[in-house]
Amino acid sequence: MANSIHLLPDHIANQIAAGEVIQRPASAVKELLENAVDAGATEIKLIINDAGKALIQVIDNGKGMNPIDAQNAFARHATSKISSIEDLFQIRTMGFRGEALASIAAVAQVSLKTRQAEDEIGTSVVIENSQVSETSPVACPVGTNISMKNLFFNVPARRNFLKSNSAELKHIIEEFTRVALAFPEIYFSLTNNGQDVFHWESGSFKQRAIHVLGNSYQAKLVAVGEKTDYLTISGFVGKPETAKKTRSDQYFFVNRRFIKSAYLHHAIANAFDGLIPKESFPSYILYIDVDPSKVDINVHPTKQEIKFEDDKIIYAFVQAAVKHALAQFSIAPSLDFSLDANIQQLDAIQKPFSEQQRNNTASSSLYTGFTQKNQAHFIPRVSEAERSEWKSFFSDIPSTDNQNGLTENNNENFIVKSSSMGLYKESEGLTINEDATLLQINNTYILAPAQAGYILVHQQLAHERVLYEKYQKASVQPHATQKSLFPVVLELSVADAILLEEIIEDLAIIGYEIEPFGQNSFIIQGIPADVISGNEKNAIELLLEQFKHFSGDIKFSKREKLIRCMARQSAIKAGQSLNQKEMHGLIESLLACDTPIVTATGAPTYIDFKEAYLDGLFTK
Ligand code: ADP
Ligand code: MG
């Protein structure tokens, strides 16, 4: 009997393996651009014809190859980037598997010209069907000029599988853009069929982002930047108005490598929650840098996936960093996002902070020194043992379901619920020990020792934030109502009656049950569970007053105005004395807020004084 198993000839084995790495012109573009980056080039030119089907050429001014390396580069598993298994865990270069050039040589006609600075003459190599068919000395500039022609000329099935030129060009531009965004210090150009498509001068990350997104983004990017011992995040998110119906303009890089991560995308989307319409996608270009040994990049290079050693920390960090950036620009707390795009363009919305406010905030310790440890979101380097605690810490962040320790407590006007960990759970990495003795100053400020320093809370503003978020969330899940035992009748002026009619439904959502009761009269059947009963009549009248005051303000929806008024009106006031339990309850609720640091109108709710800052005050 004849043997039925036989070894595939090399060139067929190579073509099969190549299919994994080179699926379309864009995959070859990615590999060649990354090789040029790895070679330390400061200028990289990409030239294509027919969307890469006829020609893909990359010219770089990197370190080049000597004659021997130039030939060896095309052998499978030829790489200069790893020589031991340990290297695998410290990879900072783009490629390392030594597969790309071999794969390309298996499916295209390749020619290479390359020279190192120390050599006077360069090398030219021509490859046909994975075999070096010609090598010769050649005069050429320092760097590498590699071109591949007629992709898949020898694999017709694959060639036929390619899409239209415009579709393939789109993929190429995508890969080109990703590499260019990761390395703004490098000049990149792209030429298609002799036409200049892009040429991007080297520059800052911001400049490159503008190259890619277009000039109109100059004023629409919010910088994100936080640094810890564990990782660094930088880059930009688009202001909410730049959110799109499709997932374009979303870039995430880890150690300058473009990655796709549904998980991290979720973290960013979460930070934008409530700021952009559902079903729309924020734009972002974010860079995370982390010790390479903390991420597993030993996944297939074309899959662009990544595994973090501790992805919960990364998630929380990314989310906090983006939220912080948005809050800093006063976007998160003060915009009403049910507004249409035209209104969002208004100056008042674009620049919700006055210069004075901005300066005040900028000089508060909350915002100074990102790179120091007194930053708002500093995540300390944690030991292995502590890390598991951090994990549960982050996974315990309350969701939007009103579990934030807010339960009814009429006597104290706001709510106390003790936490199970002995620490408040919140979103900003800030913790107040449950047993700590708090100090109320002037019946207005609360001084609370935090893990590294203390925070100074403004009781009224803090409570305003707590109530604001509570009422905001009520529109998802209507707020609890307490039925009045003795319904109160409210008689209003014609104007006020019309106004009340207008907001009666919104009031219902936050817990006010009010019904028309004949000529300009209303009957109050129920009030929010946490409002003290007895003065509901006053409360509604006051609410109407405040509402009128805001009513000229077209920036905000009715609902938003109402929520703001309610929050302001019901907040405990400065000057009211609070006991320990009340103070703890307030701070716990505050720290559980999505945006604890400012009120809806942008006033700080607390100031964070870090140990490092305090130390600084006492050094000569
Ligand atoms: P990898 O990038 O995974 O090492 P490749 O097949 O892409 O594998 O490249 C093989 C080797 O060829 C690289 O390790 C590098 O030494 C060399 N090389 C490839 N492209 C270039 C270039 N543009 N400039 C200098 N050397 C290069
Ligand atoms: Mg490579």
Image: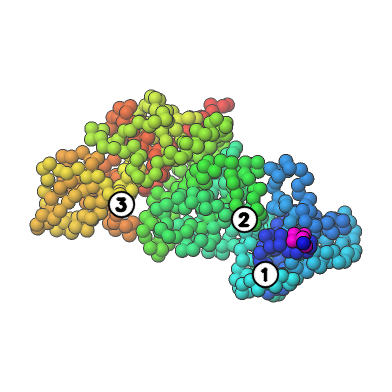
**Label 1: how many Cα within 10 Å (few below 14, some 14–19, many 20+):** some
Which residue range is magenta in the image? 2-7
Provide the residue designation for mark 1.
158
Question: Can you see residue 538?
Answer: no
Q: Position of residue 159 (x, y in %)?
A: 68, 72
Q: Are marks 1 and 3 in contact (CB under 8 Å)?
A: no
Hey, what amino acid is under mark 3?
A: Ser
**Label 3: how many Cα within 10 Å (few below 14, some 14–19, many 20+):** some
The reply, left or right, for residue 331 in relation to residue 131 is left
Hey, what amino acid is under mark 1?
A: Arg
Q: Residue at x 15, y 53 (%)?
A: 515
Instruction: Say which of marks 1 and 3 sits in front.
Output: 1
Provide the residue designation for mark 2.
303
Q: Disc 2 versus disc 3: distance between alpha carbons?
A: 41 Å
Question: Can you see residue 344?
Answer: yes
Nearer to the camera, 213 or 486: 486
